[in-house]
Image (spheres, grey):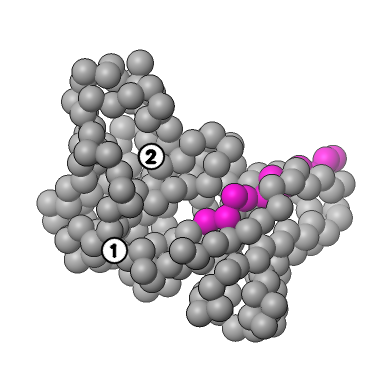
Amino acid sequence: QKEVEQNSGPLSVPEGAIASLNCTYSDQGSQSFFWYRQYSGKSPELIMFIYSNGDKEDGRFTAQLNKASQYVSLLIRDSQPSDSATYLCAVYDHQAGTALIFGKGTTLSVSS
Amino acid sequence: DTEVTQTPKHLVMGMTNKKSLKCEQHMGHRAMYWYKQKAKKPPELMFVYSYEKLSINESVPSRFSPECPNSSLLNLHLHALQPEDSALYLCASRLNTEAFFGQGTRLTVV
């Protein structure tokens, strides 16, 4: 069974700071990695995905992947109060019908 | 259009009721999923449909009965639920890499 581990937090950062969220995964065969943002009471929203080692940037978000260390991270630059949410790291489990398997999520709080 | 539509948004049902949740997508996605999410927990996989066939049932109790009438529609039939089944039920669909979630149905069993 694939496992995805995240620090549940809460992670608190001041407005304008960089928030760093981390995730490790158990299956060395995992190929693609996803970050979802979930506001309280809402459904998960895909914000980033990454396949290749290194960094992938999209606006204020940067995903970083290190397959050798089985480690994925999400950096949020210039954090805003609207970024306050739970961030879920996910991988596909191909033995489960290619369904997303989620970590427990990290709660981020950005204070103004 | 990356929309997955779930209805109803909220549902309150008694333990003897029968109700259904509906999920619809028109993106041509051939994989569809039901997840259950309890408060402060991640989504938990329930069922996977691939090309309208049930491919995965994650040991879900029989009081939950999925159905995929066509490639755009996924139902979850509910019968004799327990209060601990109260949760957010999420539908998702996937074509290649990206999976998109509906807004969920908030279910309360009384």
Q: Which of B86 and A109 is in front in this view?
A: B86
- What is the x, y in percent for residue B41? 55, 41
Above or below — where is B62 with respect to A54?
above
The residue beneath circle 1 is: B31
Question: Are labels 2 and 1 on one chain?
Answer: yes
Above or below — where is A3 with respect to B69?
below
- The C terminus of chain A is located in which quarter? top right
- What is the x, y in percent for residue A100? 44, 61
- What is the x, y in percent for residue B84? 41, 27
* Helix, strand or loop for disc 2: strand
Q: Mark 2 lies on which chain?
A: B
Above or below — where is B10 with respect to A104?
above
| Magenta stretch bounds | A102-112
Q: In this view, does B30 lie to the left or right of B9?
A: left
Disc 2 residue type? Tyr
The residue beneath circle 2 is: B89
Disc 1 residue type? Ala
Quarter assignment of residue B93: bottom left
Assess disc 1: are there few (<14), some (14-19) or many (≥20) residues with their C-alpha within 10 Å of its C-alpha: many
Quarter assignment of residue A90: bottom right
Between marks 2 and 1, how big is the CA–CA gap?
Answer: 17 Å
Q: Is residue A32 left or right of residue A72?
A: left
Quarter assignment of residue A95: bottom left
Q: Which of B31 and B45 is in front in this view?
A: B45
Of helix, strand and loop, which mostly describes the magenta segment?
strand
